[in-house]
Image (cartoon, rainbow, N blue to C red):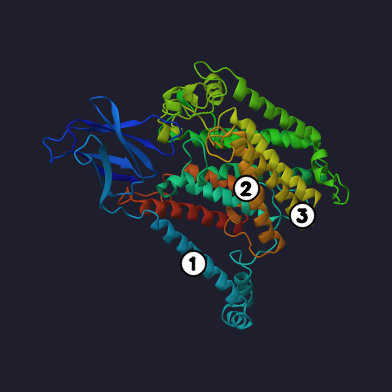
């Protein structure tokens, strides 16, 4: 999978060293692929077979072993399961060398399974939409009432797979439901469900496509989007939940105790989820991984919920848009919390760019390994990696970071480490700000959406300035492993824009009920923990006939993800929600 067969044919009278480098590898060293001996006689080239990767375009470098001279470079994007040949020969019997690539057998189109899967799921959506319209017709309604009874008819017509209906309110999976009924925004649970379902699909393998895996270092793939969005919408739910609790008369002290206790529970569950050796015996304390997804959620929730308890108001006034200072009023009202978050961000900047790291340049943000021409091989993550190894120890952090794929790093590095958790607080706090906007402009749909778009534009401008609109050459590149500042501003920009679209279609126009993403969004903790614990069990995984096929991997991962959607739907119908 993701490989092609390459034959290098050497018609020169000297050995040729073949090296390669991925085009996604920034300032990297060439990696030796092999040596092709000299041809036995003129017109009779020697040949050696190699295997090359097909995920990204690579550059082949061919050097002469006699004088260590570069003969040629060949940039090429090889296709999966294709057979290729590279001819190295003198040009017109001169000293000039020509390198040419020919295709001996066409590659397969590995993206066809994605297209088929999209058509299948789009067809299912169309069938449900058409079925709902047909059931809503008066003639069909009468026929169903005649043969199936009126109650069954109403159940079919008002099915949650079709039009939306009002349900008893429930808050985020981290906070309990408010004691008094209130209007619930389905768009928030839908947003959370979208993030969660993509996260489950990615964690199960994403069909083994590179764009459904985390980026090796700088840049973004689909897999890099969902966790920050989940953190963002958690912050939004915190604002709505705490406001509801305060309006119901709950004291801040009791809320603080609940916040601390739930954070501890989340952290403990996270430690068990990412250390699955308990299935084979006792956990080994020597290599127990401490950071993780739920642990970062616990930390972000704890800090942001505490900040909100510091400044939240039980009675939230609807802000008017008449005064000139009104656009900033929803920020000024909570300036102490904003001051704390800005202080945390200053700490992140100082530690990242000023902390001395042994044998590494100060302010280094690179992956180490073969990156930066191999000068800083042991400096993966700079200050972030150093702090994790110093506080937690090398054996208690993630051992196989995504930077190994392209940059060949060998240092342990944890993408959910200590320093990046500061920026996850910022992401959750920006989500909290979205919740404050909803509270202060409740039922003023135009004001809510315009505020969301303004925030999206503002954060997008910050991202453009920090990254210089490039992947690797900005002041602070977008980097999921580091949870860099530009990564947070970029993903928060996307989150505000996406939330506008979902809010408009689900809660304003009611064109969409949020199904099927609404159901896992209502049971997010259960779905996340369940998909991690039962990952290796049927029907979520089975032995494949051809494990080197994107098709079988995609089918398996889509079936597993769909199973969790169905499980969450059944639990929703049974009114079963796991909250901690």
Q: Is 442 located above or below residue 164 in the figure?
A: above
Label 2 sits on residue: 494
Residue placed furthest toward the left: 41
Residue ID at (50%, 28%):
366
Q: Nearer the viewer, mark 2 or mark 3?
A: 2
Is residue 254 rendered to the left or right of residue 109? right
Please state which of residues 92 and 183 is positioned toward the viewer in this rendering.
92
Residue placed furthest toward the right: 323
Residue ID at (50%, 21%):
393
Helix, strand or loop under label 3: loop
Residue 204 seen anywhere in this rendered image of the structure: no
- Please identify the quarter of the rendering in which residue 169 is found: bottom right
What x and y, as percent, mark residue 395?
46, 23
Residue ID at (13%, 41%):
43
Q: Is 10 located above or below residue 374 in the figure?
A: below
Q: Nearer the viewer, mark 1 or mark 2?
A: 2
Label 3 sits on residue: 182
Q: Are marks 3 and 1 in contact (CB under 8 Å)?
A: no
Q: Return the mark for residue 81.
A: none
Is residue 444 rendered to the left or right of residue 464? right
Residue ID at (80%, 32%):
336
Q: Is 192 located above or below residue 356 in the figure?
A: below
Please state which of residues 436 and 483 is positioned toward the viewer in this rendering.
483
Sequence order check, earlier mark of 2 and 3: 3
Label 1 sits on residue: 123
Helix, strand or loop under label 2: helix
- Please identify the quarter of the rendering in which residue 85 is found: top left
């Amino acid at each position: 999978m993701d490989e092609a067969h390459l034959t290098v044919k050497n018609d020169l009278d000297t050995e040729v060293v073949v090296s390669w480098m991925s085009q996604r590898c920034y300032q990297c060293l060439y990696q030796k692929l092999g040596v092709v001996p000299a041809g036995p006689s003129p017109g009779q080239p020697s040949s050696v077979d190699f295997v090359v990767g097909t995920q990204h375009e690579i550059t082949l470098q061919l050097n002469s072993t006699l004088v260590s001279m570069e003969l040629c470079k060949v940039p090429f994007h090889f296709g999966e399961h294709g057979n290729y040949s590279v001819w190295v020969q003198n040009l017109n019997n001169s000293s000039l060398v020509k390198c040419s690539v020919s295709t001996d057998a066409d590659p397969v189109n590995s993206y066809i399974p994605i297209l088929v899967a999209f058509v299948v799921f789009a067809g299912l959506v169309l069938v449900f939409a058409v079925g709902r319209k047909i059931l809503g017709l008066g003639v069909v309604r009468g026929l169903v009432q005649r043969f199936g009874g009126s109650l069954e008819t109403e159940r079919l017509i008002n099915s949650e797979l079709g039009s939306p209906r009002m349900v008893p309110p429930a808050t985020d999976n981290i906070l309990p439901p408010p004691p008094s009924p209130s209007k619930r925004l389905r768009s928030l649970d839908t947003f959370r469900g979208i993030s969660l379902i993509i996260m489950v699909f990615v964690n199960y393998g994403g069909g083994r496509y590179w764009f459904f895996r985390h980026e090796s270092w700088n840049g973004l793939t689909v897999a890099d989007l969902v966790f920050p969005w989940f953190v963002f919408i958690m912050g939004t739910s915190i604002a709505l939940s705490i406001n509801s609790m305060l309006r119901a008369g709950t004291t801040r002290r009791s809320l603080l105790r609940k916040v601390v206790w739930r954070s501890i529970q989340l952290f403990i569950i996270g430690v068990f989820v990412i250390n699955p050796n308990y299935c084979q015996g006792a956990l080994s304390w020597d290599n127990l991984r401490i950071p993780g997804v739920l642990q970062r959620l616990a930390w972000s929730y704890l800090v942001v919920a505490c900040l909100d308890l510091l400044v939240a108001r039980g009675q939230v006034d609807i802000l008017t848009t008449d005064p000139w200072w009104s656009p900033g009023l929803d920020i000024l009202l909570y300036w102490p919390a904003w001051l704390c978050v800005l202080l945390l961000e200053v700490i992140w900047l100082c530690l990242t760019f000023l902390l001395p790291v042994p044998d590494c340049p100060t302010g280094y943000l690179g992956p180490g390994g073969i990156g930066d021409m191999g000068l800083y091989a042991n400096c993966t993550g700079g200050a972030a990696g150093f702090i994790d190894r110093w506080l937690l120890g090398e054996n208690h952090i993630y051992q196989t970071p995504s930077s190994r794929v392209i940059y060949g790093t060998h240092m342990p590095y944890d993408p959910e480490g200590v320093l990046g958790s500061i920026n996850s607080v910022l992401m959750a706090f920006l989500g909290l700000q979205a919740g404050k906007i909803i509270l202060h402009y409740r039922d003023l749909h135009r004001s809510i959406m315009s505020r969301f778009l303004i925030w999206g534009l503002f954060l997008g401008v910050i991202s453009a300035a920090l990254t210089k609109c490039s992947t690797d050459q900005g002041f602070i590149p977008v980097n999921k492993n580091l949870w860099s500042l530009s990564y947070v501003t970029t993903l928060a920009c996307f989150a505000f824009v996406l939330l506008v679209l979902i809010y408009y279609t689900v809660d304003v126009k009611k064109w969409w009920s949020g199904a099927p993403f609404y159901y896992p969004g209502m049971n997010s903790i259960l779905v996340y923990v369940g998909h991690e614990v039962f990952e290796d069990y049927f029907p979520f995984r089975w032995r494949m006939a051809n494990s080197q096929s994107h098709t079988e991997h995609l089918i398996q991962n889509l079936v597993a993800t769909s199973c969790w959607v169905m499980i969450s739907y059944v639990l929703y119908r049974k009114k079963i929600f796991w909250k901690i």
